[in-house]
C-alpha cells in the first residue's frame, strides 16, 4: 500500500486492486443488500468474482440467522453462494466455543433460535431461548434455579431480552469459571429511512454491567471472524480485500487483520466519517480509515466485465 488512504476506487485502479487479491470478504446488509432488496449490480459482482476464480466470503455480525437461512435469502436475491462461504456470528460463536474454548458443558443463551441451531450443530446444548417471565420477589430472583451443567453465557440478539434473562445471566456468571461470550458490540441496527433500533451491543453491555465482567466478542472487528474464514480456506491476509459499509466494524476488522479495505457508501458510514478519523491523529481511529471507497460495489462491474 502507498501512503495515501481513503482513495476513490475508479478506472484502471479497480482492476489493479482486484488483480492484487485472491479472496474478497463482504459484509452483507448495506453492502450487497439493503433490507430485503439486493443492491443493484451486487449479485453480478459476486458471481463474476467467483467466475474469475476469486474466493468470496460473507461475514456478518447479525446473529439472527443460520448459515442456511443466509444462503436461502441470497439465492432468492440472485447470488451464487454456498453455505460454507457464510460466516455469521451465530455460527462463529459456536465455532469459538468449540474450537477455542473447548467447551465441555451447556450454554445459557441470550439469543435467537438461529443461534440455538448453530450451537446444536457443533454438539453444544443451549438453554434459555424464548421468553423468561418474571415471578416472585427479589429474594427469589437472586436464588433462581440454575442448571449445574451450564459452563458459559452467550449473548446475541434476543427480541425476548428481559430483566429475568439479565438476572439469570448474572447469576450464572457469578459462578467460578463460567465463560462469557458476546456475538458483537453493534449498539444500533440501522433501518431504511434513517430509522434505527437497539442492537446486540446494548444487551451485552447490560449483562456486562450486571455481571461486572467483560465478555469476549467474536464478531467484527475481532480477529476471530477472519481467523474462522482463514483457518478453513487458507486465506492469505496480504491477498485479501474486506468490503464493508461500517468503519468501526468492517474496516476496523480489515485493519486489525492486515487486509486491504474498501468502504462502500450504500450503508452506514460516509467518506466524511473516514476523513474525520484520518485527520484525528489517533492511532486507533486510523484503523477505521479504508484504503479505498466506492459509491456502490456495482462500481467494480466494468473491471469485471472488461
Image: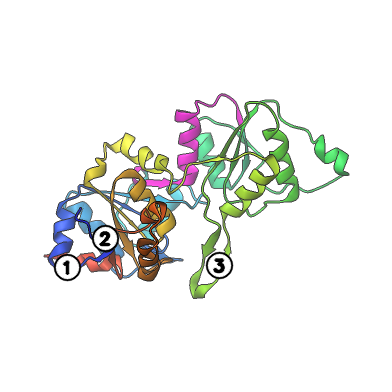
Depth order, front residue of 82/57: 57
Which stretch is magenta?
84-106
Q: Nearer the viewer, mark 2 or mark 3?
A: 2
Quadrant the C terminus occupies: bottom left
Q: How many marks?
A: 3
Q: Position of residue 87 (x, y in %)?
A: 40, 45
Q: Earlier in the sequence, mark 2 or mark 1?
A: 2
Tell me if residue 304 can be seen: no
Depth order, front residue of 6/29: 6
Q: Position of residue 190 (x, y in %)?
A: 51, 65
Q: For residue 288, which quarter of the picture? A: bottom left
* Disc 2 secondary structure class: loop
Q: Is residue 87 magenta?
A: yes
Q: Residues within 10 Å of mark 1 (few under 14, many from 20)?
A: few
As drawn, 11 above or below 149: below
* Disc 1 secondary structure class: helix
Which residue is under mark 1?
302
Q: CA distance from mark 2 to mark 1?
A: 23 Å
Q: For residue 125, which quarter of the picture? A: top right
Residue 101 left/right relative to 279:
right
Tell me if residue 24 can be seen: yes
Q: Nearer the viewer, mark 3 or mark 1?
A: 3
Q: Position of residue 3 (x, y in %)?
A: 22, 56
Q: Are marks 2 and 3 in contact (CB under 8 Å)?
A: no
Q: Earlier in the sequence, mark 3 or mark 1?
A: 3
**Mark on residue 196?**
3
Q: CA distance from mark 3 to mark 1?
A: 34 Å
**Mark on residue 5?**
2
Q: Residues within 10 Å of mark 3 (few under 14, many from 20)?
A: few
* Disc 3 secondary structure class: strand
Amino acid at each position: 500500500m502507498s501512503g495515501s488512504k481513503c482513495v476513490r476506487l475508479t478506472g484502471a485502479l479497480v482492476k489493479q486492486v482486484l488483480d492484487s487479491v485472491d479472496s474478497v470478504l463482504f459484509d452483507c446488509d448495506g453492502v450487497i443488500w439493503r433490507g430485503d432488496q439486493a443492491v443493484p449490480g451486487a449479485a453480478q459482482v459476486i458471481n463474476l468474482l467467483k467466475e474469475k476464480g476469486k474466493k468470496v466470503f460473507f461475514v456478518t455480525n447479525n446473529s439472527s440467522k443460520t448459515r442456511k437461512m443466509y444462503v436461502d435469502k441470497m439465492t432468492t436475491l440472485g447470488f451464487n453462494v454456498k453455505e460454507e462461504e457464510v460466516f455469521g456470528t451465530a455460527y462463529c460463536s459456536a465455532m469459538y466455543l468449540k474450537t477455542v474454548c473447548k467447551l465441555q458443558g451447556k450454554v445459557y443463551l441470550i439469543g435467537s433460535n438461529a443461534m440455538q441451531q448453530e450451537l446444536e450443530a457443533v454438539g453444544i446444548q443451549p438453554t434459555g431461548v424464548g421468553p423468561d417471565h418474571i415471578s416472585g420477589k427479589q429474594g427469589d430472583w437472586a436464588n433462581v434455579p440454575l442448571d449445574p451443567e451450564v459452563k458459559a453465557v452467550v449473548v446475541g440478539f434476543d427480541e425476548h431480552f428481559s430483566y429475568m434473562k439479565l438476572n439469570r445471566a448474572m447469576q450464572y456468571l457469578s459462578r467460578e469459571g463460567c465463560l462469557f461470550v458476546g456475538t458483537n458490540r453493534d449498539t444500533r441496527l440501522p433501518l431504511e429511512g434513517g430509522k434505527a433500533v437497539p442492537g446486540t451491543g446494548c444487551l451485552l453491555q447490560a449483562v456486562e454491567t450486571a455481571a461486572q465482567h467483560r465478555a469476549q466478542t467474536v464478531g467484527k472487528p475481532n480477529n476471530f471472524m477472519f481467523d474462522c474464514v482463514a483457518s478453513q480456506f487458507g486465506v492469505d491476509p496480504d491477498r485479501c480485500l474486506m468490503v464493508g459499509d461500517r468503519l468501526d466494524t468492517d474496516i476496523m476488522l480489515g485493519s486489525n487483520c492486515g487486509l486491504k479495505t474498501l468502504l462502500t457508501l450504500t450503508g452506514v458510514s460516509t467518506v466524511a466519517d473516514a476523513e474525520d478519523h484520518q485527520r484525528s491523529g489517533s492511532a486507533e481511529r486510523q484503523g477505521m480509515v479504508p484504503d479505498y471507497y466506492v459509491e456502490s460495489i456495482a462500481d467494480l462491474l466494468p473491471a469485471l466485465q472488461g
